[in-house]
Amino acid sequence: MDPTAQTLDALYAIGHRLIGQDRCRDALSLFHTMLLVEPRDERGWLALASCHEKLDEPEKAIALCELASSACEGKALRCAVALARLHKTRGDDDEAAATYEEAARIADVLDEPEMATLIAAEMAAS
């Protein structure tokens, strides 16, 4: 494994350990560092958005999920699902539906049948 990948994996693992200890503010810096090292790593965007969601900062979480799409060159599938869930939680049903449709398209393009099934189930439950 190359050193960059090892660094990203370590930052991600430690950040999630901090989240598990309810230390989201501390984890933010690790996930920011991940994005500086490799802005196309969707895990960093998703983890950063999750921290902001846990800190009751949904606007930041939404913005991060939206930015992930550009940074990850349209392949941020898990961020698209997280974004749809955020919209749904906020009662933005039309925006959630559109985002789920985009996530389904990405799942198809990336050949992610398990994610496609999850997205379909969440769309049906809406």
Image: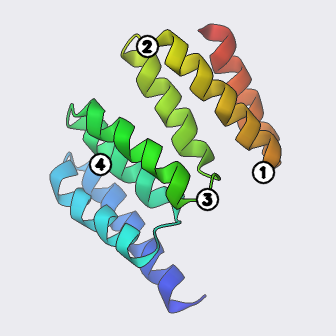
- Could you tell which of marks 4 and 1 lies nearer the N-terminus? 4
Q: CA distance from mark 4 to mark 1?
A: 30 Å
For label 4, count other residues whose C-alpha is less than 10 Å away and answer few (under 14), some (14-19) or many (20+).
Answer: few
Q: CA distance from mark 2 to mark 3?
A: 25 Å
Quadrant for the C terminus, please: top right
Quarter assignment of residue 14 = bottom left
- Could you tell which of marks 1 and 2 lies nearer the N-terminus? 2
For label 1, count other residues whose C-alpha is less than 10 Å away and answer few (under 14), some (14-19) or many (20+).
Answer: some
Q: Identify the mark at residue 73; answer none if there is no mark.
A: 3
Specify the amino acid type for callout 1. Answer: Leu
Specify the amino acid type for callout 3. Answer: Glu
Specify the amino acid type for callout 4. Answer: Gly
State if disc 1 and disc 4 touch (CB < 8 Å).
Answer: no
State if disc 2 and disc 1 touch (CB < 8 Å).
Answer: no
Q: Which is closer to the viewer, label 1 or label 2?
A: 2
Q: In the rendered view, how is the structure colored?
A: rainbow
Answer above or below: position of 92 versus 55: above
Q: Which residue matches tag 2?
A: 92
Q: CA distance from mark 4 to mark 2?
A: 29 Å
Answer above or below: position of 58 versus 41: above
- Could you tell which of marks 3 and 1 lies nearer the N-terminus? 3
Quarter assignment of residue 33 = bottom left
Specify the amino acid type for callout 2. Answer: Asp
Q: Which residue matches tag 4?
A: 20
Q: Which residue matches tag 1?
A: 110
Q: Which is closer to the viewer, label 4 or label 1?
A: 1
